[in-house]
Amino acid sequence: MPTHVLGVGRVAADRPRAPLRRSGRRQRVVAYLGELQRSEQSGWAQLGRTLSGKEKPQRWLFDPPHYDDPCEDEPLLVRLRDVRLERLRDFGDVWMALGLWRLLGLDRLLEKVAPAGREEVPWSVVAAILTSARFCRPQSELHIESTWYRGTALEDLLGVPLDKVHTDRLYGGLDWLLPQKPAIEQHLKNRLGTLFDLEYDLLLYDITSTYFEGQCAANPLARRGYSRDGRPDCLQVCIGLVVTNDGIPLGYEVFAGNRNDATTVAEIVEAMERKYGRANRVWVMDRGMVSEENLKFLRARNGQYIVGTPKAMLRQFEQYLTGQDWQEVQEGVEVKLVPGPEADETFILARSADRREKEKAMHRRFIERLEEALGKMRSSAESGRLKDEAVANRRLGRLCGQYWRAAGAFQVNIERLSPPQGKQRLRVAWTRNRRWSDWAVLSEGCYLLRTNLTQTDPATLWKRYIQLTEAEWAFRISKDELEIRPIWHQREDRVLAHILVCFLAYVLWKTLAQWMRRSGLGDAPRTVLEELAKIKSGDVVLPTQTQQGRYNGTVRLRCVTEPDEAQKVLLHRLGVTLPRRLRRIDEVVQM
């Protein structure tokens, strides 16, 4: 029969006494001990009913590893007064990370493409550690070795001892992982498509950047360019990311930090076609990618597109802004189709009430600040401090650049006085530009899209494009959550490997978001991870004794803390069940 603890079924932790209430010990359940001998398999995941894929995930994907726990046929006598809880470590978040890793089949893929050799720890396991760390608590490889890994339950979940996780092995794992990028991207496309019934006829392409700390002398891709992180002083690289209309990442490419966005389009399209074949896909890109060469390139390949256009292009369609044939696509947003100059293109004119109010406020703020700055410039001229006409024009140019949104709002005249009027040598005067003001009122909240799709429903075309802004926002949030910036690596190959690990963590992130969405939990993984991170594993220490009362060693039950009510609801909605016990360790008395 299974061995069990006499008189002990749950371990309670003391709570402090509440003042002015009844005296006595307050208790809460922190772990369920269960049987000392493992007699039944812990159930972790019920993903089959929450995911809508063609192939339902197997139950064992989230199961903990098996250990040959020692067991005896006779009961153990435990000194209840000496029972304690020790060695608390993070469990819930790393458990979820490894479950997602196996759910995506990345463990089997990496074992297949690069079988284990003579290394002490398989490189596929090192890759899982690196990705889990980036997913749960992004830090450097040194921090993983010194702090993070020893504070988690990964030692039990992966079977890798603490002394085997060090920077040399983690850096080696980066070097090993990078050549597997093509196989990983191909595998993820197929696996994610199976899990979530994804469609690949609409692809969204966006560019982001991440900067470096250091000189990066060994990395030719590190260049200064337009920084989306507000760090133009730092070297950077650009990352071109392709996602589906659901925001699921499909692939990425890394470009030099000074690369213009529009010059990457042909390269990324050809890369996607090499990996996944040439098909009549619809590419959705923002106005930074648009050039006549790029559109001609796509049309030559029978490609279709929906792209944004520069704001200046809106003036060509001024006559259509005042028409009445607008179609409401959602509350506060209206669109209309406009014929293009070429027969093979259509333009979609859109206007948003929220965007109008935002642009109106921005114009007002810039106008007020520019007029205030012009007033200071006039005062300087009147006092004689500003007396050089060339200096005054340069100052005006800087002001127009600083307040560029209102640069056309005023007609500024700088003239030299002859003869001077006391100390004053220059006169600075300005008037409102009525033409600019009329156009601002008419165009505020409006923007223009461009497509070569033959369908004529403006609502459908607008909704397809608007998915790009949602993907941009999701990726911007994930850059913060995964702390993809700054990069501390200096070598080009290490930088590329670091970005690959960030990409894999981003895939886990979006997988969890899709899973949450199908579970009715929204699509903000950070909330779930923060709750799961509160779930710990710990050793319930049971000092034992003989029938004669002599100390007979210690039994350690490595258990998972009991989730609170909110966490139970969350786990139930996700369809997963936590394990209650991981392993048993007997510490016998040395005779």
Image (cartoon, grey):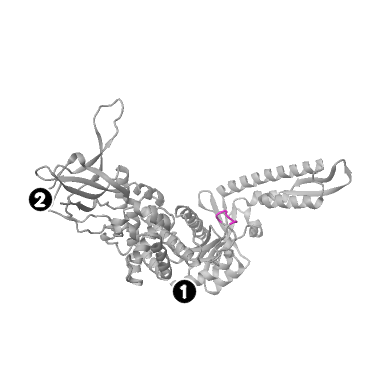
Q: Residue at x 44, y 72 (%)?
A: 275
Q: Residues within 10 Å of mark 2 (few under 14, many from 20)?
A: few
For the question of whether residue 203 can be seen, the reply is: no
**Front label number (1 vs 2):** 2
Specify the label residue 274 is tagged with: 1
Q: Residue furthest right?
A: 419
Most common secondary structure along the magenta stretch = loop
The residue segment tinted magenta is: 228-233
Residue 151 counted in the magenta span: no
Point out the tag, 1 or 2, that comes first from the N-terminus: 2
Residue 5 on image: x %, y %:
15, 46
Residue 491 on image: x %, y %:
50, 65
Q: Tell me: 165 left or right of 44.
A: right
Establish if 576 lies above or below 257: above
Could you tell me which secondary element the residue under label 2 belongs to? loop
Q: Residues within 10 Å of mark 1 (few under 14, many from 20)?
A: few
Residue 232 counted in the magenta span: yes
Establish if 274 lies above or below 197: below
